[in-house]
């Protein structure tokens, strides 16, 4: 990050539609993972309303098809379609990639799971790391050529302020020796999201692909907290402090994703972490804002990239 974070004329209460007001996306194609509900649905809706051809990656095709129909603009060039994508299933990720044709201008890595009971994929991976990071890592890597073909593509990675609570446990990513803590696993996966953006922005700069991460804020009425009931009763380390921004509705929660995916104000910006539609300042202990130093560390970002590749390679050789 720079010493002076990027500041824009938006804030915590800005909506997704407001950040792209007047922007024409009529010649752009987008993929939004987790696009059938919550801020993913709103992200897809707003991009399509601005003219983009949007594909929402969904686990439930019946629900995804219904949502695509509901949020497709009644007129104009914008459209929404659903395609099956289960990020915890690498064969599903590979199928999605294999079916893609042509350039891809916007890839919004939005889907996620938060603090479920211990669950493992068929590879033995802890499901939050497998879904929130490895699935998106494989998807973005598989779509790299399509992104490069767009000559100015943007990758947007939805992380969380929860990343400030912990780094990646490189010595035990899958909690095979440590007691499983759902919140530690969540923090690890959200830190991995930011580290991915740091390393991908470096590796893909020659291809004119920008990659940024973001904290959408605390959003009311989404399915992310389905494993923990009322998120406002989550552990104390995840509670808001007096300096936190208040809860957002879904249109406000999707605003930073849409900003990074489509706004001309961040053209060429890469390798950054945003919140409330502005680049975040460094995190300070005791305040639930900002980006932690461990998530922006280039050495750890490079290490995570290699570890992720090794995990995917090992899984491919055993299936």
Image (spheres, helix red, strand yellow):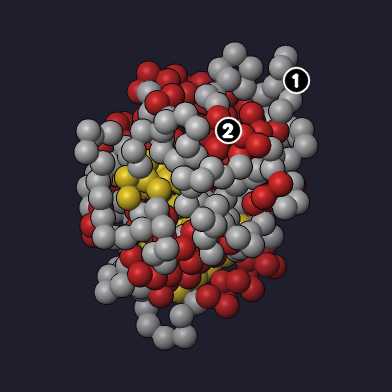
Left or right: 101, with 234 as reference point: left
**Label at residue 264:** none
Residue 138 visible: no
**Disc nearer the start of the sequence (1/2):** 1
Q: CA distance from mark 1 to mark 2?
A: 15 Å
Q: Residues within 10 Å of mark 2 (few under 14, many from 20)?
A: many
| Residue 187 badge | 2
Asked whether the viewer can see residue 41, the reply is: yes
Q: Residue 67 in the image: x percent, y percent?
A: 60, 71
Q: Estimate how packed mark 1 is, as few (under 14), some (14 to 19) or many (20 or more) residues with alpha carbons within 10 Å.
A: few
Vertical placement of residue 235 versus 299, above or below = below
Q: Between residues 220 and 148, which one lies in front from this camera angle?
A: 220
For the point 70% across and 22% down, which residue is it? Answer: 175
Q: Quadrant of the N terminus?
A: top left
Q: Is residue 201 left or right of residue 84?
A: left
Residue drawn at x 33%, y 65% is: 19
**Which quadrant is home to the C terminus?**
top right
Q: Which residue is mark 1?
A: 179
């Amino acid at each position: 990050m720079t010493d002076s974070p990027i500041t824009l004329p938006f804030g915590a209460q800005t909506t997704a539609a407001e950040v792209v007001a007047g922007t024409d996306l009529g010649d752009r194609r987008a993929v939004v993972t987790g696009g059938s509900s919550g801020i993913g649905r709103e992200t897809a809706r707003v991009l399509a309303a601005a003219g983009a051809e949007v594909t929402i990656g969904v686990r439930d095709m019946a629900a995804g098809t219904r949502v695509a129909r509901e949020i497709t603009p009644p007129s104009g060039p914008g459209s929404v379609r659903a395609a099956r994508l289960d990020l915890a299933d690498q064969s599903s990720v590979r199928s999605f990639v294999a079916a893609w044709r042509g350039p891809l201008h916007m890839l919004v890595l939005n889907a996620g799971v938060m603090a479920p009971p211990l669950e493992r994929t068929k590879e033995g991976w802890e499901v939050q790391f497998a879904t929130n990071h490895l699935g998106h890592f494989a998807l973005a890597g598989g779509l790299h050529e399509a992104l490069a073909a767009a000559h100015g593509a943007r990758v947007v990675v939805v992380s969380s302020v929860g990343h400030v609570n912990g780094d990646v446990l490189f010595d035990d990513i899958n909690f095979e020796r440590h007691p499983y803590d759902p919140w530690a696993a969540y923090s690890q996966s959200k830190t991995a999201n930011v580290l991915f953006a740091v390393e991908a922005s470096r590796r893909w700069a020659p291809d004119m692909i920008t990659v940024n991460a973001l904290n959408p804020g605390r959003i009311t009425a989404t399915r992310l907290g389905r494993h923990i009931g009322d998120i406002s009763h989550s552990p104390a380390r995840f509670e808001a402090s007096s300096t936190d921004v208040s809860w957002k509705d879904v249109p406000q929660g999707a605003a930073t994703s849409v900003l990074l995916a489509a706004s001309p104000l961040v053209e060429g910006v890469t390798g950054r972490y945003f919140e409330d539609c502005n680049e975040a300042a460094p995190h300070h202990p005791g305040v639930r804002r900002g980006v932690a130093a461990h998530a922006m560390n280039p050495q750890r970002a490079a290490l995570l990239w290699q570890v992720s590749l090794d995990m995917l390679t090992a899984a491919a050789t055993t299936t």
